[in-house]
Image (cartoon, grey):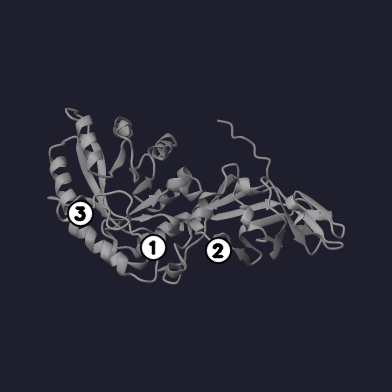
Amino acid sequence: MRQRAEYRPTRAIIDLAAIESNVKNLKTALPCRTAIIAVVKADGYGHGASECARAALRAGASMVSVATPDEALVLREDGIEEPILVMGPAPVSFVPEAIRRRIVLTVPGISWAKETAAFLKGSRETLHVHVKFDTGMGRIGIRDEREAEELAELLASAPSIQVDGAFTHFARADEEDPSKTKQQFSRFLDVLSVFPERPACVHAANSAAAFRFPEYALDAVRFGIGMYGIPPSDVIARRLPFPLKRALRLETEAAYVKRAEEGETISYGSTYAAHEGEWIATLPIGYADGLKRNLREQQVLVRGIRIPIAGAICMDQCMITLPMEIPEGEPVVLIGTQQGEEIKMEEWADRLGTIPYEIAVTIGGRVQRQYIRG
């Protein structure tokens, strides 16, 4: 298939070698029997699901996981043959496709299990599942021993449903106080013990727990945000067992450069007035690309120098104020390193009052992704 040409210089450069390095380092840090489930939901946290899945699998991950059935189908259609776990709820209508495509589904609760068992009654085909336990996250899952007993009895009479795994999700593993996480882990083991047979793949640790609580590794850990080189929180960043390599760099070029007149206003609302002789550059990136309007005055890198955004950020463009003249086509880095200076996703997140996860997944789809290795 002929690849579509990209003429816009705004791009996210994804270093697949960084992802491979993070997976290999985690594998070395984990007990030898613990597998890695590479989490590539939300299009690989904005990095590209299929490309990142392949990189993680090359580096030693044994399974990939997503949030929705549609995300799993994209991976299969892109040639990913390894096991795929859908961690979120899937409609029972998806069950035949899951069986056909060898996609593992999550049991989110008793009612879903009943409906699925009835749907598959008399079938000679097998649906593979992981059972979700809600130990304090409050989203989906089996909540107590009574529900666990009911589910175990139901599954025993449903030969077409094969339980391959069981898991829970920690709500506060990235925080300083470990008590909630310890409580959840203990609760998980207690409720899981109700099952007559322990599933082959029991997993609880996300990136934060994999870094901070190696004793919770169990049969597998789910490597999400950390796989892309982003610490789950400042607390975890101070406790990393190995340095993370950041995989994403967001860059563009100066599309237009001018010398402004004194008092010349910039962008919507005329909120910025230029100084005499000030140089202004227009960048082809805006809030439709993930550069939120509230990032006004956020800095970018030009020749390794931090340069502020001037005025309101537009849908497709923004302007920066320069201490010197630069040529059109000059490289500009919005996230990443340039000449020894670095702007991290955390900087954007702090300015917006959010977390780096949200920054990563909201980089717009029209920002071209370019893949490199090293």
Q: Is residue 231 left or right of residue 189?
A: right
Label 2's element? helix
Q: Would residue 326 be seen by someone viewing this image from the given angle?
A: no
For badge 3, the amino acid type reads: Asp
Give how far across and how far down residue 288 sits, in percent. Answer: 62, 45
Label 1's element? helix
Which residue in the rendered view is the most extreme toward the front?
269
Q: CA distance from mark 2 to mark 1?
A: 19 Å
Task: Quarter of the image for the C terminus: give it.
Answer: bottom right
Residue named by callout 3: 144
For badge 1, the amino acid type reads: Ala
Choose the circle earlier in sequence order: 2 or 1: 1
Q: Would residue 143 be seen by someone viewing this image from the given angle?
A: yes
Label annotation for residue 350: 2
Give how far across and how far down residue 266 sits, in percent. Answer: 77, 54
Choose the circle earlier in sequence order: 3 or 2: 3
